[in-house]
């Protein structure tokens, strides 16, 4: 690659990663020559190439500034190994329905901003008394929050983590350490980041399928636990990622009883439970736990406080093990974000924030479903999410959603193909759509465009 293209690629990458944003000033040609040891001609050609790509604009007497129209950016290409991963599905496209995060436009940040500002007034005093378990004020407010839902958590059981992902990782490591087993049952389709973490920890995965009605085959699970003796069972019982399905209450009770009988841990990811679409909330598996079997992990990262990286774990009989692992990994959790969330919960304003968010998500779900039913190939099946912000669509046999994704990206759309949600050899004819990013007023044609692409591939 020539010096010119290397230089142009350097700045393009910085723009795609968000290091350089629309309106940012780039170095002058003279400075570019000095910093990178290139000639003036090379510098001019590099900037000309960026202008040709629509990423740069030369302004009279103002130098060069970034301009990034949506059509100029694309999600990152898959890694050199050719494997598509969740981080490749960014928000760079006009219709980023494959993105795993909630649409930030739906989050009312005003109350959290105020809570953070007020909480920091007490920051100096809080510095002197923050144990490894986390900020005491937040642990107390979380305990009260659960109590208001009829759920009792032991005071010494709750530990604050750096986001929900750290809580899951600690739970996985603790379960393996306690059992000596190097395998875990994973309910599929599953949260891709959990699958990646299990791979990273060297834990083999035993898939257990979730039915299209949101139920588990508990007899098959019973046999699996007897034969394999895994370290734990990893699942979301409430508004499961990616299907949005809800495990029936009777199955929740039976699952916990089964795990207690086999003395195997349940690692419960309860991240989406606050985003229910019914008239009232639902219970976590932890509510049915009487022996410390359930390692309950959650956060407000998908609802009240995206980006604050505050999660928690109630680890039952493995609380001491989790505490030791936390001490050896991140030592503690950043204090300001804990204080802000504690202040917000204490104010009671979080209830109205969640109510408005649920209503918005439900409206977008209904609007997207209507468009999918009109546009997608005949025989497509939509699972009915009862909460969260994901729509799982099962397409007719023979369609390969991963193979079709590049063509969708060319149209400004992306989705998450089903192969991301299985340890291996998962079905290829399903996809996950993030309806929090669906704008019913301006994106109706986008669903029709995606549907046309799928129908064309079927022919």
Image (cartoon, grey):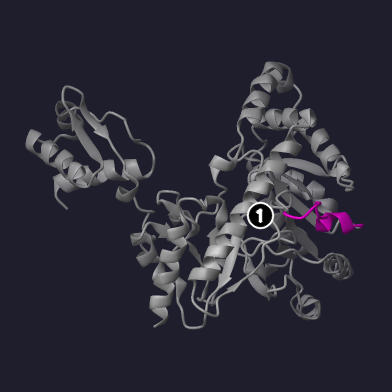
Q: Which residue occupies 80% across, 78% down?
A: 226
Q: Residues within 10 Å of mark 1 (few under 14, many from 20)?
A: many
Dividing the picture into quarters, in which one does residue 128 lie? top right
Dividing the picture into quarters, in which one does residue 43 lie? top left
Quadrant for the C terminus in the image: bottom left
Kind of element beneath mark 1? loop
Q: Which residue occupies 84% across, 52% down?
A: 316
Dividing the picture into quarters, in which one does residue 47 lie? top left
Q: Which residue occupies 31% across, 41% down?
A: 68
Magenta residues span 277-290
**Closer-to-camera residue (115/436):** 436
Left or right: where does residue 263 sit relative to residue 242?
Answer: right
Residue at the disc numbered 1? 388
**Closer-to-camera residue (96/198):** 96
Left or right: where does residue 262 sit relative to residue 434?
Answer: right
What kind of secondary structure does the magenta stretch mostly adopt? loop
């Amino acid at each position: 690659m020539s010096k010119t293209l290397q230089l142009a690629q350097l700045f393009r990458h910085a723009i795609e990663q968000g290091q350089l944003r629309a309106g940012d000033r780039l170095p002058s040609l003279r400075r570019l020559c000095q910093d990178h040891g290139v000639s003036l001609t090379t510098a001019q050609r590099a900037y000309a190439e960026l202008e040709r790509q629509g990423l740069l604009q030369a302004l009279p007497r103002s130098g060069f500034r970034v301009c990034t129209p949506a059509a100029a950016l694309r999600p990152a290409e898959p890694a050199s190994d050719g494997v598509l991963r969740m981080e490749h599905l960014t928000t760079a496209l006009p219709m980023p329905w494959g993105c795993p995060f909630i649409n930030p436009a739906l989050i009312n940040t005003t109350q959290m901003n105020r809570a953070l500002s007020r909480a920091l007034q007490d920051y100096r005093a809080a510095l002197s008394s923050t144990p490894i378990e986390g900020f005491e004020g937040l642990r107390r407010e979380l305990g009260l929050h659960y109590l208001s839902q009829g759920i009792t958590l032991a005071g010494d059981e709750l530990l604050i983590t750096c986001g929900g992902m750290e809580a899951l990782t600690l739970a996985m490591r603790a379960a393996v350490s306690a059992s000596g087993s190097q395998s875990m049952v994973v309910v599929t389709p599953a949260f891709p980041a959990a699958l990646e973490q299990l791979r990273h920890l060297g834990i083999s995965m035993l898939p257990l399928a979730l039915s299209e009605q949101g139920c588990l085959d508990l007899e098959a699970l019973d046999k699996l636990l007897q034969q394999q003796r895994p370290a734990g069972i990893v699942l979301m019982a409430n508004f499961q990622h990616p299907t949005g399905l809800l495990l029936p209450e009777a199955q929740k009770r039976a699952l916990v009883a089964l795990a207690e009988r086999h003395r195997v841990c349940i690692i419960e990811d309860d991240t989406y439970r606050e985003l229910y679409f019914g008239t009232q909330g639902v219970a976590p598996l932890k509510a049915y736990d009487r022996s410390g079997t359930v390692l309950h992990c959650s956060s407000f990262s998908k609802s009240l406080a995206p980006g604050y990286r505050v999660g928690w774990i109630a680890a039952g009989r493995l609380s001491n093990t989790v505490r030791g692992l936390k001490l050896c990994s991140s030592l503690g959790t950043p204090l300001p974000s804990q204080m802000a969330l504690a202040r917000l919960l204490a104010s009671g304003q979080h209830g109205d924030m969640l109510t408005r968010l649920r209503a918005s998500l439900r409206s977008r779900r209904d609007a997207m479903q209507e468009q999918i039913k009109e546009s997608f190939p005949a025989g497509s099946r939509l699972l009915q999410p009862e909460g969260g912000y994901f729509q799982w669509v099962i397409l007719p046999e023979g369609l390969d959603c991963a193979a079709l994704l590049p063509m969708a990206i060319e149209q400004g759309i992306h989705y998450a193909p089903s192969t991301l949600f299985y340890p291996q050899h998962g079905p290829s004819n399903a996809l996950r759509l993030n309806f929090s990013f669906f704008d019913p007023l301006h994106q109706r044609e986008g669903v029709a465009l995606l549907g046309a692409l799928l129908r064309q591939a079927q022919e």
